[in-house]
Amino acid sequence: MIACVDVDYRKSCVVAACVCFREFPDTVASGEHALRSTTPPHPYVSGSMYLRELPYLLEVLAPVRAGLRVAVVDAYVWLRDGSPGIGARLHETLGGEVAVVGIAKTGFYGASGVAEVRRGTSESPVFVSAAGMALADAAAAVASMAGPHRLPTFVKRADLLSRELYP
């Protein structure tokens, strides 16, 4: 199973969402769920976003963890000079058993291990990085994902789902 995950923060709560599917080119999700936490998130610390996001990613992935092969995050896997980003931290926390593919919308100066992938008719690329999967395979997988636009359909759906559960 593959899961696209996203986390959205507000002052009063945090929502994490997960959209699951079987293969990268799938056009129909096999399931989706979200969780809302009223526990305030860890304060933002530059370069340590994983402290804020990782607990919610792990919690939203818990119900599908047994069959999970790949987690797709809306973030970088690797940062400047190969230091771990959220994706690498997630890969490590999951014991290296689940590949993590990062899809970022904006370039990050100095990020290592990144491939630019152009999707649909967009002239702007998405920036793909990976842990537990070869970068070329991750880039090909993202290119094959459903959706006619720059962002794959399931990535957009996880983002929307994470914003729908606010009071």
Image (spheres, helix red, strand yellow):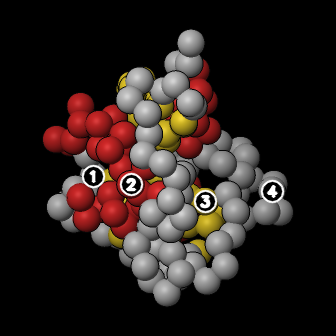
Circle 3 sits in a helix, a strand or a loop, which is it? strand
Label 4's element? Answer: loop
Name which residue type carries label 3. Ala
Which residue is depicted at the point 34% across and 63% down? 89
Q: Residue at x 48, y 26 (%)?
A: 13
Circle nearer the viewer, 3 or 2: 2
Q: Which residue is mark 4?
A: 122
| Residue 69 badge | 1
Disc 2 marks which residue?
A: 51
Disc 4 + disc 2, Cβ < 8 Å: no
Label 4, label 2: how far apart the Cα atoms are: 33 Å
Q: Which residue is mark 3?
A: 104
**Label 2 to label 1: alpha-carbon separation:** 23 Å
Q: Residues within 10 Å of mark 3 (few under 14, many from 20)?
A: many
- Pointer 2: residues within 10 angstroms few (<14), some, or many (20+)? some
Question: Separation of disc 1 and disc 4 at Cα?
Answer: 29 Å
Task: Name which of mark 1 and mark 3 comes first in the sequence.
Answer: 1
Q: Amino acid at mark 2?
A: Leu
Q: Nearer the viewer, mark 3 or mark 4?
A: 3
Q: Earlier in the sequence, mark 4 or mark 2?
A: 2
Q: Earlier in the sequence, mark 1 or mark 4?
A: 1
Q: Residue at x 59, y 75 (%)?
A: 115
Residue 159 picture location, percent across and down: 58, 36
